[in-house]
Amino acid sequence: MDERALPITDHLTELRNRLSWIVGSMILGAILSFNFAEQIFSYLLAPATNALGEKGSQLQAIAPTEIFFTYIKCALLSGFIMTLPVSFYHLWSFIAPGLYDNERKAVLPFVFFSTVLFAGGAIFGYSMVFPIVFEFFNGWDNEWVVSAWSMKEVFSLTTRLFLAFGVAFEMPLFVFFLAITGILSARQLLAGTPYAILIMFILGALLTPPDFVSQVFLAVPMVVLYLIGVGVAFFFEPERREAREAKKEGRAVAKRD
């Protein structure tokens, strides 16, 4: 662990620089994506358009600027996804000085697993949950009301679910981070599993539409991933304990000398 205490202004300067890299790369990715915004939009909202198509309906644009600005949002989302490795790299580089030397070297595994977990969560939500959600909401048509969804609202819901599942699948790394930084031990994390389950189901209710299926599809994987994270923390905790003890012994020897 780096014991050199830096002034708060230096930390803020570093944070500003890293945020500039993250935002700049996202904007560049969005600019590159804008030419393909229509294709990206078509693919991303396929679960919704397929559900509407079963009844001969389609998405609606109810404002003159709706299509244009929705495509801009679509390009921004694409830029965010494309540059996730850059974002995760700068996130790890910012927190790494507070870790031990062997943990600091884990930047590439962190970037890799963070990106893979986010992508895995987003793909899981898109392929398994989105069709069920839109079929559910499209099933409320009757003789008085016919579904005619706005593309802006459907894109907003899809983006929220897409990001929710991506972030939710980062759970193992979040739990592992709590363990290696010493905020909570692996044993404490395991003992807190009932509370974690409750929190995850609450988050599932807040982050998804008001239907039971999508809430369960988000909360249950989070619980499983939480337990995986606890298992990984148990595996690496002895190594961190040894590093901490070696550090203490080194200080004691230095004092005697």
Image (cartoon, rainbow, N blue to C red):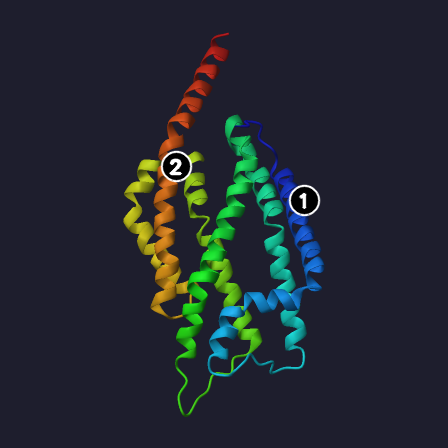
Tell me which residue sits at (57%, 30%) in the image: 5
> Can you identify the residue that label 2 sits on?
232
> Can you identify the residue that label 1 sits on?
17
Locate residue 190: give its quadrant.
top left
Kind of element beneath mark 2: helix
Tell me which residue sits at (37%, 53%) in the image: 221
Q: Amino acid at mark 1?
A: Asn
Tell me which residue sits at (62%, 45%) in the image: 86
Foreground residue among 47 and 114? 47
- Mark seen at residue 204: none
Q: Is residue 102 above or below residue 151?
A: above
Question: x and y percent of residue 32 in the render?
Answer: 71, 58
Q: Amino acid at mark 2?
A: Val
Foreground residue among 143 and 102? 143
Identity of the residue furthest to the bottom in this view: 144
Tell whether 114 sits left or right of 245.
right
Tell me which residue sits at (47%, 15%) in the image: 250
Tell whether 188 sits left or right of 163.
left
Question: x and y percent of residue 46 in the render?
Answer: 53, 69
Question: x and y percent of residue 192 in the render?
Answer: 30, 45
Asked if disc 1 and disc 2 are in contact, CB closer than 8 Å, the reply is no
For discs 1 and 2, the disc positioned in front in the rendered view: 2
Q: Is residue 197 above or below residue 88?
A: below
